[in-house]
Amino acid sequence: MSNVLAAETAAAPAAQTLSRGGSHKRNKRSTSVALAMLAPAAVLMVVFLIIPIFLTFGLAFTNARLISPVPARFIGFDNFVRLFGNDTFWRSLLNTVVFTIVIVPVQSGLALGLALLVNAKIRGTNFFRTVYFLPVVTSIVVVSMLWLFMYQPDGLINALLAKIGITGPDWLGDPNTALFAIIVLSIWQAVGFHMVIWLSGLQTIPGELYEAASIDGAGTWQQFVHVTWPGLRQTSIFILITITIAAFSLFSQVNIMTQGGPLNSTSTLVYMAVHSGFEQQQTGYAAAISLVFFALVLAVSLVQRYLTRDKESSR
Amino acid sequence: MLKRTAKLVAATALAASLTFSLAACAKGGATSTQAATPGGTQTLSLWTHNAGNKGELAAIQSVVDEYNASQTNYKVEVQAFPQDSYNQSVVAAAAAKKLPCILDIDQPNVANWAWAGYLAPIEGMDDILSKYLPSTVAKWNGTTYAYGYYDVALTWVTTKSILKKYGARVPTVDQPWTGEEFMALLKKIKDSGDFKYAADMATGWTGEWWPYGYSPQLQAFGGDLINRSDYKTADGVLNGDKAIAWANWFASMAKDGYMPKKSSADPAADFYNGKSALLWNGSWTALPAREKFGDDVVFAPPVDFGNGGAVGGGSWTWGYSTGCASKEGALDYLKFASADKYVAKVAKDTNNIPTTDAAAAMVPGFEPGGTSDVFRQISKKYTVMRPETPGYPFIATTFTKAAQDILAGADPKTTLDQAVKDIDDNQKANNYFQ
């Protein structure tokens, strides 16, 4: 019902503006056409994003189950009480936060380094750009399967380590190394994407600025600090936000490689929600986890938005 | 002006029709799956999980073809799904009230789906099904909801030469290894250093394999997943002394280096290649193992750790849904398809244990005294069904996580206590599935 309403509200202002004349006519008209064009996308957003979010709000306070002949019942904050008393939840939250805190600076830093390298004016940069970008176009499922083999106790990585006399650990089987192993693979897989974004940012910086800087006697490092980095400010905000959100929603690698183990060392909020909601059929409980996750991502995004806005206005 | 209006109308109409068609999708009735044709033939839809499994799909298709040719009242139509998304498809269909008429169900899900009202009870087949292996007749609360053509048995795969070399006897179905015998054998093999691992229990597999493969070992120690007298609590059976003895044994198998903590993706290949001396696996390894080792191969029954051995039971089973427009048609098909020759055909094409004696006589290897007869005997003697309660999916995933944590070094008592608490909470939250 509400999706039909949304379509009507999207169309309503358009209908009003049509009957109006006057000097703003052209502007108003293009607004209404824009609104009409927006409608299909807006409807899809409402049906597949907004409504599910509101459903999650509702379901989180019920005992709804995936399969059950008994209708869902309102149970207040029971799901949240259970959730906050669950060690797996706190461990998943910690893992999610650790993953994000490591991924954001390391991945964006590495991506910037790679971008600077492949931006150099030497032969063969296209080859390296393609190589670094290859993991991005490979499905994360395939990548996870490959690394699963590489991380085995007698897999490729440990075989290489053995060559230089190091006995490698059981990467995914040891609670101390499992999350680290997943972090490394995740960076390897996604770094190419952010490299391309940095690269596009780098190429918008005019060459004259570097020429002027070198005439003024600036060295490579000074050029980077005073020309390159300020020129990349907009790009860096975009990269910060996209990496953060992607890092928070870590799921596929965990699902394929470790299923949250060993000893919860790789469990994440999204993995926990999917596991509870589908494998354990507790729709209400999973909705509560999703709601906590939603609040977390919203809070972090708002903080980031506030910080980046602040910088813009102070310039 | 007109042009713009037209554009607007078109865009709005597009948006509106999109929403309406979505709404229509969600509200579609159960009517479309069964339609009566003018000739009086009623079409019954049949869903199976076999899309990726050529042998089994072809066998089921041939049963359906023979049924369709045998009468004119009903026409059964096969629709195959990939196994990975099959359960989700059925759940989604149930939510949309579009369940197929006849469907196959993984046995441990039967209680859950029967409780949810997806499955209708099978009536009038008691005589036929009394000849089936009990593990292939899926019941809940004393009512039969589905039957299967075959079962699978768990077994320790090894060879006579290995057993001879390390001085162990070849166990028989009536006299399985005891826990002491088994551990003494593993120790000898390990101390010899001839194999990378003395045993391999396929710990690299995920999902349902964990409860299927390892809860029988828990039962062999005298523990269980839940108290089966009333299915209300797991307290005392999943965290009692015997369960803790199992957990200590399970953890020590990896910690003391008897088996890999996480097996490779293909533990059978590791066994064939001499990396491990004993392999805990299903009867599906029979064919390749026999090809590799010939008559030297040994399929040993489960180890008796004090409470007799146990193997899991129950595989894919057939039933019909409450959404079926023609109960008579569905029962008619299920009766027709339960004949021994079809049991033999499906079991043969899938290399599984035929459920009836008469069918076993028709499948090469499974006749009494045949090379694969041992699996039928193991199945008959040792099968302990996975708990037939609608709470099973939760119990299974909780047990899986607990067993994985124990293998990774968690404290057995704390881990099992937590698992018991979670299982009890879930049974209680669902009012014990009354």
Image: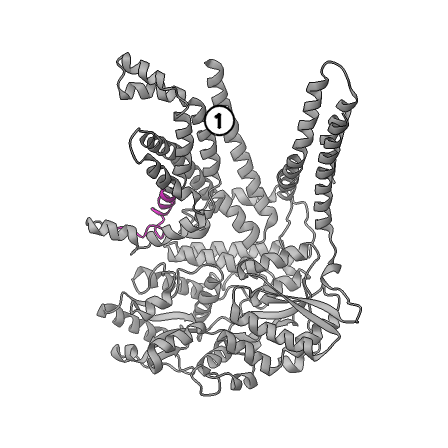
Does the magenta portion include B332?
A: no
Does residue B318 lie above or below A307 as drawn? below
In the rendered view, would you say A301 is above or below B203?
A: above
Q: Is residue B238 left or right of residue B62?
A: left
Name the residue located 74 percent from the left edge and 26 percent from the top edge: A13
A35 vs A251, nearest the viewer: A35
Q: How many marks?
A: 1
Q: Is residue A68 visible to us here? A: no
Is B319 positioned to the left or the right of B16 in the image?
Answer: left
Q: Is residue B193 above or below residue A137?
A: below
Kind of residue sitting beneath label 1: Gln
Where disc 1 sits, the SS reads: helix
Residue B122 is at least partly visible in this image: yes
Q: Tell me where residue B10 appears, x and y as whole percent.
A: 73, 35
Q: Quadrant of the C terminus of chain A?
A: top left
Residue with the mark numbered 1: A304
Picture colour scheme: one colour
Q: Position of residue B174 (x, y in %)?
A: 43, 83
Tell me where residue A78 appears, x and y as whole percent.
60, 44
What x and y, as percent, mark residue A92?
46, 43
Q: Residues within 10 Å of mark 1 (few under 14, many from 20)?
A: some
- Residue nearer the viewer, A80 or B210: B210
Give, as a single range, the part of the protein colored magenta.
A168-185
View extreme (left): residue: A165
The part of the image, by quadrant, that contains residue A23 is top right
Q: Of residues B271 and B398, which is closer to you in this image?
A: B271
* Picture layout, residue A117 above or below residue B112: above
The one of B238 and A112 positioned closer to us in this rendering: A112
Q: Chain of mark 1?
A: A
